[in-house]
Image (cartoon, helix red, strand yellow):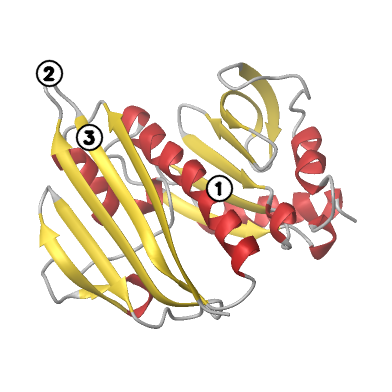
Amino acid sequence: MSKEFEIVREFEVDASPEQVWDAITTGTAGWLWPMEYEPKEGGAAPFGGTVTAWDPPHRLTGRTEDAEGVSQQTFNQLDHVIEPREGGGSWVRYVHSGILVEDWDNQYDGANKHTDFYMHTLRQYLEHFSGRAATFATLDAPVTSNAPGGLEVVSRGLGLPDDAVQGATVRVEVPGAGPVDAVLDYRNQYFIGLRTDEAMYRIFGRNHFGAPVGVSVHDFAGGADPARNEDAWRTWLTGLFA
């Protein structure tokens, strides 16, 4: 049964409105995935959508009537409002709305929880990597990761202690990078975020939502190779879940 949804987040960040604007329009590879907006009202938006508000650096809205490649959803809209904060920084209001056409509760629950992780990663990007170009790689673990404990298998495979808490600095074995010291910038039962001086690693426990565990790599190092990152993680994950 079709049903509307709306997910709203508001937050403050120590970045200028111009920096936030750049992050959500041209810097998306650094915290989400590469996307492009045609810079004008009526221009092209991601997933076959249309830009319905283009007011840099204050308002961006993209609307899609039939999202390309998304069978569970028809109408989809992303709305961003950015305002300068007194004393510096910005206040951001993000609204994701639309219509889900199947598996409503599970789809909404997944989107709602993913939003927290994505908005956190946006703030991490703005606070630690703002303006830096990133290469982006993403992949899913083998289908066997779609099981209870799938995220924990990846966590322990990286060498992340079970008792490590968000904010701790940990020593982990990153595929393609070797042993590194990283900040555990996000951790709950659904997601893990690791940040080094040159990259952010996002691990998605999508096994909680009926899908394999996912990984994305936002690599800010000069000369970073997204194909190499993807291959290293794929080989590692395949062995981990063999």
Label 1: state its secondary structure.
helix
Give residue 57's position: percent from left, percent from top. Answer: 12, 48
From the viewer's perspective, tell me whether residue 178 is left or right of residue 13.
right
Residue at image coords 80%, 33%: 156
Q: What's the CA distance linking mark 2 and mark 3?
A: 12 Å
The circle drawn on residue 87 is 2
From the viewer's perspective, is 88 left or right of 202? left
Q: Quadrant location of residue 36?
A: bottom left
> Residue at image x 80%, y 64%?
143
Calculate the distance from the C-alpha at mark 1 to the C-alpha at mark 2. 31 Å
Q: Which residue is drawn at 44% across and 37% down?
A: 120
x then y, percent, for residue 1: 58, 80
Q: In this view, does 169 lie above or below 210?
A: above
Write down the quadrant of residue 97 in the picture.
bottom left
Label for residue 91?
A: 3
Q: Horizontally, is 179 left or right of 78 in the view?
A: right
Mark on residue 113? 1
Asked if disc 1 and disc 2 are in contact, CB closer than 8 Å, the reply is: no
Q: Which amino acid does label 1 sit on?
A: Lys
Query: At 20% across and 48% down in the image, what residue appears?
Result: 81
Location of residue 38 with respect to 6 vertically, above or below: below
Residue 207, label in figure: none
Give the distance between the C-alpha atoms of the residues marked 3 and 1, in whole angstroms: 21 Å
Name the amino acid, label 2. Answer: Gly
